[in-house]
Image (cartoon, rainbow, N blue to C red):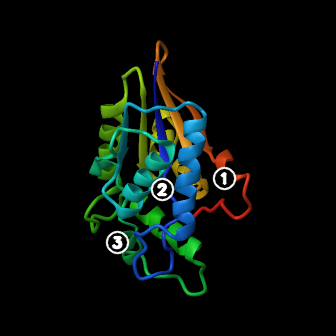
Amino acid sequence: MGQVLLVRHGQASFGSDDYDVLSGLGERQAAVLGRSLAARGIVPAAVLHGQMVRQRRTAELLAEAAGWEPAPVCDPDWDEMDHVEVLSRHPEPEGASFQEWFEAATDRWIAGEHDDYAESFEEFTRRVDEALDRVLGGDGTVVVVTSGGPISWVCTRLLAAGLDSYRRFARVVANTGVTKVVTGARGTSLVSFNDHSHLEAEPGLLTYR
């Protein structure tokens, strides 16, 4: 039996000039997760990450903290969707919170009724499907550091759920939350979603953005 551990990156620098950089807290989250996985005896055959800085840096820090030898490898198909472009296609509603704006803009993208995106939702899900298929089927563990969007789509796909489930998953993926996918005699199964117990021992470590 093989397993894939999908890890959301640590907290990025929301509200700063460069979002795609881990905050100090995000770096701590990554290190805490690495030590937690090592304590559980997890020794991956491979560590992958998307090409975004926040994903790569999380992979490097958790692998270092865990004492893993495989050097993290980039697979850009695990990148997050372009949230900046998605927001730009939907003007900010007056009086709305950032979360309300983001969800409305994402709904426009998901609906597939507009062709003004560099990457449509259909194209996004297709590349994530391909990335997942490439890591399924082995006997060992593969750790993939990615983002909330790809993780939410993998869960939606494996549960054969609708797009409303994708939206619900995406709202609650914690920074460095771990989602487990296993392959075996019964095929491929989602066995846990968004485990963030490694963050609960220290107040203030749990974040969602």
Using the image, tell me which numbered label, if any, was put on residue 169: none
Disc 3 versus disc 2: distance between alpha carbons? 20 Å
Rendered image: mark on residue 199? 1
Q: Quadrant of residue 111?
A: bottom left
Label 2: which residue? Answer: 9
Q: CA distance from mark 1 to mark 2?
A: 13 Å
Q: Residue at x 73, y 52 (%)?
A: 201
Amino acid type, callout 1: Leu
Q: Image height check: is 190 above or below 73?
A: above
Front label number (1 vs 2): 1
Mark 1 secondary-structure assignment: helix
Residue drawn 53% across the image and 63% down it: 26
Give percent across and percent down for residue 42.
Answer: 52, 32
Please name the amino acid that badge 2 sits on.
Answer: His
Q: Which residue is mark 3?
A: 85
Q: Earlier in the sequence, mark 3 or mark 1?
A: 3
Q: Between marks 3 and 1, how big is the CA–CA gap?
A: 31 Å
184 or 162: nearer the eye?
A: 184
**Position of residue 200 in the picture relative to residue 184 (left or right):** right
Mark 3 or mark 2: whose residue is earlier in sequence? 2
Residue reaching furthest bottom?
A: 94
Report crowding for label 3: few under 14, some 14 to 19, many 20 or more residues within 10 A (C-alpha).
Answer: some
Q: In the visual, does 25 lie left or right of 7? A: right
Please state which of the two labelled residues, at mark 3 or mark 2, is closer to the viewer.
2
Question: Where is residue 83, by image quadrant?
Answer: bottom left
